[in-house]
Image (cartoon, helix red, strand yellow):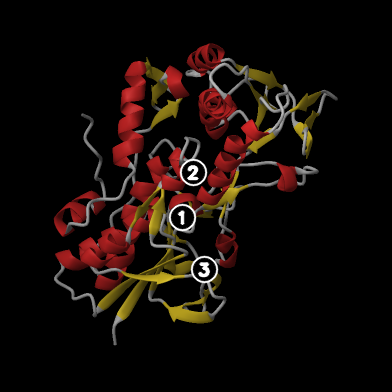
Amino acid sequence: MSKQVVIVGAGFAGMYAALAAARLRDCHGVAPDAIEIVVVAPEAALTLRPRLHESAPARMAAPLDVLFDTVGVRFVEGWVETIDTTASRLALRNGEGQRGGIGYDRLVLAAGSRLAMPAVPGLAQFAFSVDQREDAVALERHLQALAERPRSASRNTVVVAGGGFTGIETAAELPARLRLALGDDSEVHVVIVERAEAIGPDLGPGPRPVIEQALDALGVQRRLGVAVTSVDANGVLLSDGARIDAATVIWTGGVQASALTRQIPAERDGAGRLLVDRDLRVPGAASVFAAGDAASAQTDEAGHRTLMSCQHAMPLGRVAGNNAMADLLGVPATPYVQPRYVTCLDLGPWGAVLTQGWQRQVQLAGAEAKVLKRQINQRWIYPPLAHRGTAFEMAEPGYHPTVE
């Protein structure tokens, strides 16, 4: 009877987990019908989530069906509703509402994350986001429809709630996107509201002067040390009692790991991520590995841990898929390690900023950094070509793209 490695999710981590498992299976001459690799996800496509703050988000997806067929991975379209680690079985639901199930010998949970939506009055009803592709598409349609409204300061104002990585990247793109929608001569206002006393609180002081310089040049305003307390169809109220009239409110206030992580009997962090060992196995659930935004893993001997970003998701996927297959083959696992850490923050038409290390020392800024950011967003994060040799090379644990 054949065995199965089942991977939940077709994001960066899930895609590379599937490719890495197929690569190791191939290296050991094992036939696909002896150990089957199955990916379960709503669609056989990789959403290019780091690009959803840009215009034309409907195009920010890359098909995976041909790639999976090329390397011998079976795709199952559907959603995982429950995970039974005792029976090693998943309960599934497809787009037509039909239910079924699938067993696993090894499971890689790479189900990603979702935008955290706190109980702020009006938030769910009136705010937009760039969290998922459908969210970004809804925002794009809204921005394009603004020109049909009467001219007003409110129509021309966008509030971005959250001044972290996503909030900054989103806000930096918006002045140009608004002018494109409303006309180049329109006076537009983009305001970031951040509860911390400084922009980019999680990014630290290193890149902050560059970020502030870029936002000033783009005309992006900041309201720091205050929070959005309610949202309505015409704007937001802030914790200091002020009101900002705005036809568009975008929420970027952090993400939480997939709720599926709560079905694994194991320890999780504050973001709901499963705490995994160096092989990315979930302690207490011997047949389960976790990767991407579903996992919190130690990156180096200094004790730094992975962030919810594709920079960590891709290597995590490679190692988790490799090790799930290695466990079935009875060969040594490859411990996850990723001591090199960089941040490349997109700052819209102004450029970008590249930092090195966990202290985020600025290495490049402006147009020079933008060249690298474009290479990351337009090449590195895309799936490999549907060619076995290329796909397996890029799926090898430790793979890192070459800077050109």
Identify which amino acid the numbered label 3 is placed on.
Trp
Quadrant in the rendering for residue 189 = top right
Q: Position of residue 339 (x, y in %)?
A: 34, 36
Identify which amino acid the numbered label 1 is placed on.
Val
347 in relation to 126, above or below: above
Seen in the image, is 197 located left or right of residue 8?
right
Instruction: Assign the N terminus to one quadrant of the image.
Output: bottom left
* Residue found 53% across the figure and 16% down from its top: 218
294 in relation to 6, above or below: above
**Earlier along the polypeptide chain: callout 2 or callout 3?**
3
Query: Among all residues in the image, which is located at the extreme right?
Result: 241
Q: Position of residue 342 (x, y in %)?
A: 38, 30
Query: Among all residues in the image, which is located at the extreme bottom?
Result: 1
Q: Secondary structure at mark 3?
A: strand
Q: Which mark is residue 308?
A: 2
Of labels 2 and 3, the one closer to you: 3
Q: Secondary structure at mark 1?
A: loop
Name the residue nearer the viewer: 175 or 102: 175
Q: Is label 2 in contact with label 1 (beta carbons under 8 Å)?
A: no
- Please tell me how crowded label 2 is: few (under 14), some (14-19), or many (20+) other residues with Cα within 10 Å: many
Q: Position of residue 78 (x, y in %)?
A: 48, 70
Seen in the image, is 393 located left or right of residue 229?
left
Q: Which mark is residue 79?
A: 3
Report the residue marked by disc 1. Answer: 276
